[in-house]
Amino acid sequence: MKLSEDTVQVLKNFSGINQSLQFKAGKTLKTISPLKTIFVEATVGEDFPKEFALYDLNKLLAKVSLYKDADLSFDDDKLNISANKKSDYIKYLFPYKHKSTSQYIYFMNFIFVEISQMIFPKDF
C-alpha cells in the first residue's frame, strides 16, 4: 500500500493534535487531543487492512519521507516501509479489550508477553 500526499498531509495534521494514533481497518481515521478538546475525523483514499496503533505518528512520517514512493506492508507485529531495495519498519501496538469496561488497551508485542504471564484479578 502506498500513502498518497493527501493522506500524508492528514497524518501530519493529526500528529499536531495527538502524537499517537489508532488506525482502524478501513478508510476512516480519527484522532482526539489529549485534553479531549479537539476531535477530528478524515476519510482517506487508502484502505488500511487491519487495526493497529502507533505511539509516535511522527516516526512514521519521518520514515515515509525518507523513501520516495514508499510501499507499506503489514506484518503481525510491525509496519514495513520499503522502496528501491531499502526497507525499515515500525513496531506497532496491539489492541486488548478490557473485559469489564470494554475499552481497548494497547501493548507492544514484547510487553504483552510479560503482562500475559502475570496474574490479574478475575474481572480484568
Image (cartoon, rainbow, N blue to C red):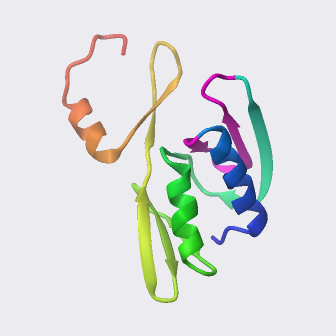
Q: Tell me residue 65's x, y (percent).
A: 59, 71
Tell me, yes or no, whether the highlighted magenta stretch contains residue 30: yes
In screen coordinates, is 31 left or right of 72? right
Point 55% across, 54% down: residue:
58
Q: Total number of numbered labels?
A: 0
Pick the residue in front: 57 or 119: 57
Pick the residue in front: 113 or 83: 83
Point 78% across, 40% down: residue:
41
Figure quadrant of the C terminus: top left
Up-down: is 113 above or below 64?
A: above
Q: Tell me residue 44's x, y (percent).
A: 78, 56
Q: Tell me residue 30's x, y (percent).
A: 70, 40
Pick the residue in front: 15 or 95: 15
Q: Tell me residue 15's x, y (percent).
A: 63, 46
Which range is magenta? 19-36
Point 63% across, 80% down: residue:
69
Kindly give the residue lying farthest to the front in the view shown.
16
Snapshot quadrant of residue 1: bottom right
In screen coordinates, is 67 left or right of 110? right
Point 61% across, 57% down: residue:
49
Tell me, yes or no, whether the highlighted magenta stretch contains residue 10: no
Up-down: is 33 above or below 60?
A: above
Snapshot quadrant of residue 24: top right
Kindly give the residue lying farthest to the bottom in the view shown.
84
